[in-house]
Amino acid sequence: MNFICIAALAQAITLCVEGADVSTVCGTVDSFIEAELLKTFSNKKSKKLERGIAFPTCLSVNEICGHYSPCADESTKLATEDLVKIELGAHIDGYTANVAHTLIIGGKAKDKKAAVTLAAWDAYTAATKVIKSGGFNHEVTAAIGKVCE
């Protein structure tokens, strides 16, 4: 099932271009997930397995924190230098797989957007280096704080 989510994420990334409608991208990727899930475990025994969207495709653009999957009449279009956070998930018989990715439309940002994006990546990298078994939250917080300084 994870391979379905990864393929759906790859499709979402290719659809996220300048001028793309957010609602259309979300709907297209959700339809792709549902179609792929019908192909998985398609023998007679497994037809009874529940399967579907575990987390609807969301494209959170710029200042929107998360979970933005608009209706067609509330949708917006993507523009160059938009920061887009993609989230989606699928499930088979209650077992879920979720994936996420962040990208910048056009591939590059300038000025403050570039600085913030780089700072977020650096904070993530610093945090992953100190996370370990038996570690403490304050160690991770301190590593992120050093990046922020």
Image (cartoon, rainbow, N blue to C red):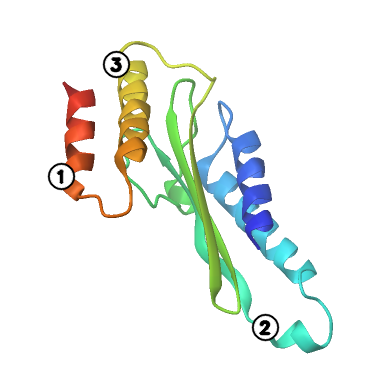
Seen from this angle, which residue lies furthest front?
134
Going from N to C along the chain, the mark reached first, 1 or 3, is 3
Separation of marks 1 and 3 at Cα, in angstroms: 28 Å
User: What is the total number of numbered labels drawn onto the structure image?
Assistant: 3
Could you tell whether 121 is left or right of 28 in the image? left
Callout 3 secondary element: helix
Separation of marks 2 and 3 at Cα, in angstroms: 48 Å
- Percent from the top left, x then y, of residue 24? 58, 46
- Percent from the top left, x then y, of residue 43? 84, 81
The C terminus is located in which quarter? top left
Q: State the residue in front, 31 or 55.
A: 55
Q: Are marks 2 and 3 in contact (CB under 8 Å)?
A: no
Residue count near mark 1 (Cα–Cα under 10 Å), binned few <14, some 14–19, many ≥20: few
- Percent from the top left, x then y, of residue 70? 44, 51
Q: State the residue in front, 126 or 99.
A: 126
| Residue found at x 17% / y 30% | 145
> To which quarter of the image does residue 130 belong?
top left
User: Which residue is identified by label 1?
Assistant: 138
Q: State the residue in front, 66 or 20.
A: 66
**Circle 2: residue type:** Leu
Which disc number belongs to residue 49? 2
